Amino acid sequence: MLVPDPTSKTSRAAREQAPRDDAPLRGPVRTCAGCGKREAARDLVRIALGEMVGDASAPAHTAVVDLRGTSTGRGAHVHPVKECLAKAARGGLSRAFKCAIATTADDLSDQLASSAARRVTGLLGGAYRARRLEAGSDVVVEACREGRARLVVVATDASAAAKLTEVREAIDEGRAIAWANKRELGALFGRDEVAVCVVLDDGIADELGRAHQLVRSFSSTRSEAWWSPEVR
């Protein structure tokens, strides 16, 4: 889900409407291999059993992050937070799979970041092909004014676009993310450059927000640059 600025009106409203801790979980429920807490599967990340490594005297399997939950075979689940990843790597995954697992918290974090980055890119391209995304400052401003904007995506080197009134409001309300640079963003849509685009679908916007948050949490570099002197 999207993570708004905690000081914004949107964030306060979300907290007021958030489910209680004792509220029943909806949908499939899984156990975190790190902390052991039962949680809705959509709030956990699936870990698939990987290939065999090591020698005959100390066989072990690798652990593969399955962000989309599409890998076949045995799987375990873990909260996408560093503490749970660390506990899962230290023994939680071995207990869940009932075999030795050769992994580290850093390896799981790196896999999460790279998988989430690919997920963001794939969702943006897919949304554009499905006509659930429009690119360009004028159409973004129009969509925001008409209330059709579900998520605004701004290139990290597009400082002018980030200063547009409608885009700034989306940023302040937690309805915007920064992603790639103008050339990289443009390449997804068959253009030379794109400074800003807008997602028009609630489901796609939600998935993008989740994937982007994982990149923010586990990547060694930050993609946002609106407040940074690196913005040109």
Image (spheres, grey):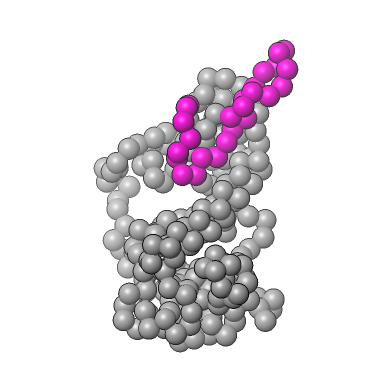
Span colored in magenta: 50-74
**Quadrant assignment, res 223:** bottom right
Q: What residue sits 67% from the left and 81% below the top?
A: 232
Q: Position of residue 104 (x, y in %)?
A: 66, 36
Q: Position of residue 3 (x, y in %)?
A: 45, 62
Q: Position of residue 99 (x, y in %)?
A: 57, 20
Point out the image quarter for the N terminus.
bottom left
| Up-down relation of residue 28 to residue 194 (above or below) | above
Q: Is residue 15 visible?
A: no
Q: Nearer the viewer, residue 199 or 6?
A: 199
Q: Position of residue 95 (x, y in %)?
A: 53, 23
Residue 58 is inside the magenta segment = yes
| Up-down relation of residue 41 to residue 134 (above or below) | above
**Side of 108 where 66 appears, left or right:** left
Q: Is residue 187 visible?
A: yes
Residue 122 is inside the magenta segment = no
Q: Residue furthest front?
A: 190
Q: Residue furthest top?
A: 57
Q: What residue sits 56% from the left and 25% below the top?
A: 94
Q: What residue sits 70% from the left and 17% below the top?
A: 58
Q: What residue sits 29% from the left and 61% below the top?
A: 17
